[in-house]
Image (cartoon, helix red, strand yellow):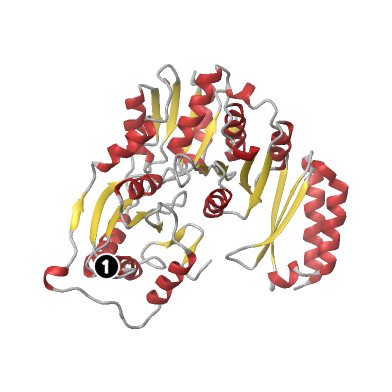
Amino acid sequence: MGKYFGTDGVRGLAGQKLNSSLAFRIGRFIGQYPGGKKNRILIGCDTRLSCDMLKTAIVSGILASGSDAYLLDVTTTPSISYLVVKKGYDYGVMISASHNPYYDNGIKVFNRQGEKLDSKIEKLIEDYIDSPTDFLPLRMNEFFGRMVPSVDLVDEYVDFLASKARDLGHLKVLVDGANGSASLVAPKLFKKLGIQANYINIHPNGININDRCGSTHLGQLVLEMKKNGYDIGLAFDGDADRLLIVRHGGQVVDGDAILYLAAVDMQKRGVLKENTVVATVMSNIGLKIALKKHNMRVKEVQVGDKYVQACLKEQNLPLGGEQSGHIIFLQDLNTGDGLLTAIKVMNILVSTGKPLEELLGDLKIYPQALKNVSVANKEAVLAHGGLQSLIDELETTLGDTGRILVRASGTESLVRIMAEAPTFEECDRVVSALVNYINEISY
């Protein structure tokens, strides 16, 4: 990760870390890179109060560099990825901090393939942001860029999603829009599909996005699913690139379970290449065990949907995702899409005629314990030979029924310890042993 760009673009407290000056420079850079032509750049945002401020700054930078800005207004992050490719834009920009509170915001930039930017380009942008002078060429006279209203393009994205759906008209669905992007797009899509959908948290006011709602706060959706006769509950995050599901009895279906559902379905249809699913190191060991029963395997990458997508593309594999609900169907779209994932799961319900609890019968999610240890030198801790010996010893006791993950935080002076085992007691025993050892190292 760079100074400003993380695994999901630039993110921070709006108006401070992520301010209009930084946004202007991002717009300036992509408005003139790689040079020699007028770029066409698509821009969308979620429902945060700070989106207008950041959008205005980005657009100003784009126009000053002589490129044209095509404005979508409120939309989903995956719609940017889709439309950039379909319409041949040079870049796509989404202003969103995904599942974060309203006071945070972010800038996600896509290249013309609908993918997150290459790290080399991110580094060039960061160098320009930190430059004391604006050394990029400024346009004058007839060479300024233009703003082009493009709100209607969202309908083309909705049509694309609808083309992936079976006849879903008899399903009863409850949707939590997180007061974000899905609040506007999901009703349009589900109406087009004839789905009997009811909605909660679809009245954004600029500050209620992800506020005790959506995929990171499932309590309200769980309660509603327990007392009403819905077939499925769908919880989106602020920009609708991830999805978590709640079953009709109130049980949560996370990204690992969704990956399992999709993998089994794709294997039966003969479209799961090499019987392989891409997941991150945080996916539950229960996913591996359940897929192994179906003669499938998991290829692991580091945390971040950016890395899942890169592995899928490199290995030419069709399916991957994260426990958090980012699921990528690479043959359909280059990025995770909560609405597309919802359609895929509802297609499975309709085609099998079975409820989720039956479809997930072979999947056992193992108990998990996670603790963070504050340290002075996280690299030295992880390199400590005695710590690795203890990890090896504990892994031997767990055997094939558990696992241990010890890693450094990417942003803080912390070592993160995670253990999975058949019981919570076993998880706590393993994590406590590692925490105590690290504290004794005193690095």
Q: Position of residue 171 (x, y in %)?
A: 45, 19
**Outermost residue, left direction?**
141
Residue at screen point 27% across, 62% down:
39
Residue at screen point 80% across, 41% down:
401
Residue 224 seen in render: no
Q: Position of residue 116 (x, y in %)?
A: 45, 56
Q: Secondary structure at mark 1?
A: helix
Q: Position of residue 275 (x, y in %)?
A: 65, 37
Q: Nearer the viewer, residue 329 or 125?
A: 329
The residue under label 1 is 61
Under mark 1, the amino acid is: Gly
Instruction: Quadrant for residue 363, please give it.
Output: top right
In screen coordinates, is 354 left or right of 297?
left
In screen coordinates, is 109 left or right of 42?
right
Q: Nearer the viewer, residue 368 or 76?
A: 76
Q: Nearer the viewer, residue 359 or 51?
A: 359
Number of marks in the image? 1
In screen coordinates, is 408 left or right of 181?
right
Q: Position of residue 244 (x, y in %)?
A: 53, 37
How packed is label 1: few (under 14 Cα within 10 Å), some, or many (20 or more)?
Answer: many
Q: Nearer the viewer, residue 393 or 13?
A: 393
